[in-house]
Amino acid sequence: RVVMFDRCLVATGASPAVPPIPGLKDIPYWTSTEALISDTIPERLAVIGSSVVALELAQAFARLGSQVTILARGTLFLREDPAIGEAITAAFRAEGIEVLEHTQASQIAYADGEFVLATGKGELRADKLLIATGRAPNTRRLNLEAADVAINAQGAIVIDQGMRTNSPNIYAAGDCTDQPQFVYVAAAAGTRAAINMMGGSAALDLTAMPAVVFTDPQVATVGYSEAEAHHNGIETDSRTLTLDNVPRALANFDTRGFIKLVAEVGSGRLIGVQVVAPEAGEMIQTAALAIRNRMTVQELADQLFPYLTMVEGLKLAAQTFTRDVKQLSCCAG
């Protein structure tokens, strides 16, 4: 069937990516899809992966009663600030989740209901195996080259801020594109694509896009990490405040984690925030608004924050650029 169009929107999403590990192809491993619909809890669960989906599901199954082992090719959250991976690794190990860093499966076998993984650190056996190594854009079968639509090395459709591809009148939105794979990004992109397909000029600016990982403690980020800023030629100044300096964290008897602020040298403008905390997701939007409004760390430090809230930690972290918060009384402005 041939369908003619004046404008086209590609929104085909993404699917779990499966690495080419010998022996994996024809055995009943889980992806996130099977894990989320399972009506049983495996006694032993092996997880291959080290980022969002892998770690959220690993901790969930551990708390439901599984003995969980995570195999990370590098470290946890390798693409984020190293302190994030270190904090989550420590938290996971403290609750009995085994984290094997710099470990890959060289061969996987399945027999008699048991998975056997050969690794550089020995043999690992499990009742279920979860593969959570990212998601691949659903573009391979679209024959995009016939329409001269450009994709990147990962198969994602390359788009501009208006969701336009390089081919006239063809737009794309969501996880099949080179934008971050978050539902709220996809929703915003789809709205703007629709506007532009009807002759509008809407753009999606992702420079202050907040992201949250729902582990415990949570991970929340917005803007540049130090490494990303340096890669883009931006000189930075940063401060890290551990949660034992945040009154609400002390009151909660849970000081796992930290708040890190990244500022641009010279202007003092806040350009990035990384938070590991039990309620990091509830804090990050304040940081996103500060970055969006081009606030300096001093301006953030001067704001009024309600005492005994976790978000007050952002103010305290900003104050550390000019003073020692350990010497301040509570609520000191």
Image (spheres, grey):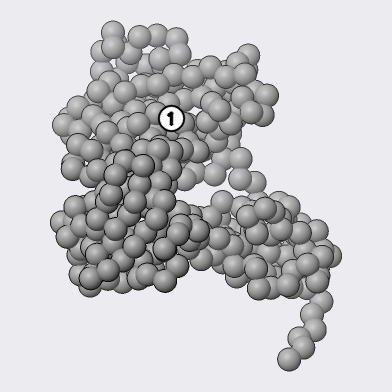
User: Compared with residue 320, is residue 103 higher up or lower down, i.e. above or below?
Assistant: below
Q: Is residue 30 above or below residue 238?
A: below
Which is more toward the observer, 9 or 299? Answer: 9
Left or right of 84? Residue 145 is right
Which residue is located at x 31 percent, y 41 percent?
121
Q: Position of residue 72 (x, y in %)?
A: 39, 44
Q: Which residue is mark 1?
A: 82
Seen from the viewer's position, the closer of residues 47 and 161 is: 47
Visible in this render: residue 214?
Answer: no
Which residue is depicted at the point 80% across and 84% down?
Answer: 4
Q: Which secondary structure lies at badge 1?
A: helix
Q: Residues within 10 Å of mark 1 (few under 14, many from 20)?
A: some
Q: Looking at the image, which residue sits at the far bottom?
A: 1
Residue at the farthest right position: 168
Where does the N terminus fall, quadrant-wise? bottom right
Amino acid beneath label 1:
Pro
Please state which of residues 306 and 237 is positioned toward the viewer in this rendering. 237
Quadrant hosting residue 236: top right
Query: Residue at (24%, 43%) from the top-left corner?
Result: 98
Instruction: Pick whichever, 165 or 150, lies toward us.
Output: 150
